[in-house]
Amino acid sequence: MDCRPACAACCIAPSISTPLPGHPQGKPAGVACAQLDVDLRCRLFGRPERPAVCGSLQPSAEMCGARREHALRWLAWLETATATTS
């Protein structure tokens, strides 16, 4: 499955615990990544600075659904379901 144009749900909904350009402490869940451009495309795609977690998240029918809103909800649910408490 290919990514939906102008979706960027995977660059907004999940948290990123490792540093990346624009987010030296990582990115909180629900916050748009600083590396999204105006077309909602990743400026780090294919570059070594891109976090491994981003490269490992692959689009799927279950995650992406038929619309961007589905992907945002599904990823937010996954973020909550996998969150660790301190």
Image (tube, grey):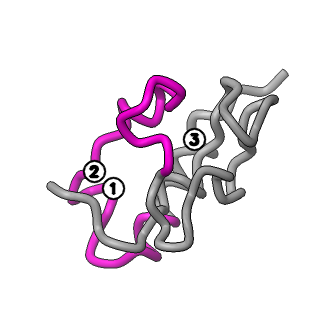
Q: Residue 9, image x and y in percent?
A: 49, 61
Mark 3 or mark 2, whichever is nearer to me: 2
Name above or below for residue 7 compared with residue 78.
below
Out of 14 and 19, give the one closest to the viewer: 19
Q: Which mark is residue 59?
A: 2
Magenta span contains residue 48 = yes
Residue 81: which disc?
3
Quadrant in which residue 2 is drawn: bottom left
Instruction: Tell me the magenta residue range.
Output: 43-72
Amino acid on which the number 3 mark rests in the picture? Ala
Q: Can you name the residue that lies furthest to the left here? A: 1
Q: Residue at x 46, y 76 (%)?
A: 69
Look at mark 1 in the image and give the residue it sits on. Answer: 63
CB contact under 8 Å: marks 2 and 1: yes
Q: Which mark's residue is nearer the viewer, 2 or 1? A: 2
In the rendered image, residue 6, in percent from the top left (x then y), is placed at 41, 73
Mark 1 residue type: Met
Q: Residue 65's x, y, as percent? A: 29, 68
Q: Is residue 58 magenta?
A: yes
